[in-house]
Amino acid sequence: MGLPLDIATVPDEEFRTEARDWLLANLVGEYASLKGRGGPGDEEIGFEIRERWELVLGEAGWIGLGWPTEFGGRNATVAQQIIWAEEYARAQAPGRVNHMGENLLGPTLIEHGTPEQCERFLPPILRGEERWCQGYSEPNAGSDLANVQTKAVLDGDQWIINGQKVWTSLAHVSHWCFVVARTEAGSVRHKGLSFLLVPMDQPGVESRAIVQITGGGEFNEVFFSDAVTDASLIIGEPGKGWGVAMDLLALERGISTLAQQVGFEREMDQLLAMAKERGSSSDPIMRQRLASAWIGLKLMQWNALRSMGTGVPGPEASISKLFWGTWHRDLGELAMDIGGIESQIAEGFPYELTLDQKLFLFTRSETIYGGSNEIQRNVLGERVLGLPKEPNPS
């Protein structure tokens, strides 16, 4: 690869040319067979091929571009990260398989982890070798994350973990899980929680797929039954994991949407092409809806840029989650409307769906998971605008 390790001083156009040329040269063979695949509702397609693609990206230094060089990254500027996302989308490269590791856990470790933790976990993420999932939500602690009931008890040099997580994306193909657990007996709400790193391949961990309406099983229930992890694999201080968990959520709702928007831009381009092919773009109302969707995409990208320029975002990051969840749901509806009556017919028997149908069905969940729209509005009202708290019905 022609670019140096630290690419912050590389001119943007030179960086764009390098990224475009690399993708053109490497997105061939089995990887080219998955162009445009692996998006919402389509996450299981060609997973083994996409695993190998991750290794190719890691070997060439395209993972963790924005991480500091002292942590194995390449110190890419915000503009360069945007350029990489744009070129990746234009090349229709396959959906990535370790968003949780690269965009959420990695930056959280850099911010809160010990040198030993960073040395152990960051390099395998950069090489594309280890995948992560997120152990936050529970049956009675979804948007209300502070109600976590999964417990962890320190026993000698190990944490013993018992409880259940749910909606755990790609848990069945992950090597590790970052888990929010209650480690102080009798504690309630935000207090007494800890942020633990837990290996998935052990007798005390069971993943059960939740089959979705799209036909796939990306989401999982995860059961911890006397599962263990080393006493040293706690991020931050015991009982003070809420702050770590919130910093990670801020990344999920702010900076990391840059990677997510790779898929959004690809979907928008495909939708525009379909509208032109079907003649929908000549209809004034449909043209206005397409224009509004395109404007919304640009607003998301600019908001992500703003978030990336301020370090770890605060509660303002809820703006991003509220906006993109609603935008993407509306995009799914727009895709079905452009498809017309044919969009109501499955592609094959008994339940083979088109990508547009998967998009429509999957995006129904996006105003709920990761904190529902209602929760995001409360966060913005109370913690950003300083409005009175919502009345407690009890």
Image (cartoon, helix red, strand yellow):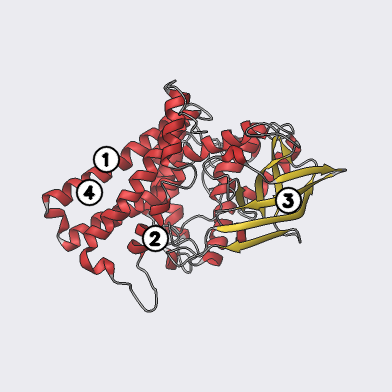
Residue furthest top in the image? 386
Q: What kind of element bears circle 3?
A: strand
Element carrying mark 2: loop
Q: Identify residue for label 4.
A: 290
Q: In this figure, which residue is indicated by the disc labeled 1?
A: 295
SS type, badge 1: helix
In this view, the mark in front (2 or 1) = 1
Q: Is residue 7 visible?
A: no
Q: What residue type is disc 2 on?
A: Gly
x, y percent for residue 257: 45, 42
* 2 or 4: tag closer to the N-terminus: 2
Residue placed most toward the observer, 54 or 336: 336
x 72%, y 45%: residue = 151
Cα distance between the residues tagged 2 and 4: 20 Å
From this view, report whether residue 336 is shown above or below residue 127.
Answer: below
The location of residue 165, given as percent across then percent down, is 62, 51
Residue under pointer 2:
36
The mark that comes first in sequence, 2 or 1, is: 2
Q: Which mark is residue 162?
A: 3
Q: In the rendered structure, which disc, 1 or 3, sits on the residue that comes first in sequence?
A: 3
Amino acid type of the residue tagged 4 in the rendering:
Leu
User: Gap between marks 2 and 1, in whole Å?
Assistant: 22 Å
For label 4, the crowd category at 10 Å Cα-Cα, with few meaning under 14, some 14 to 19 and many 20 or more, is many
Q: Are marks 1 and 4 in contact (CB under 8 Å)?
A: no
* Residue drawn at the location 42% of the way across and 49% of the way down: 366
Earlier residue among tags 2 and 3: 2
Instruction: Single out the mark in the foreground, 4 or 3.
Output: 3
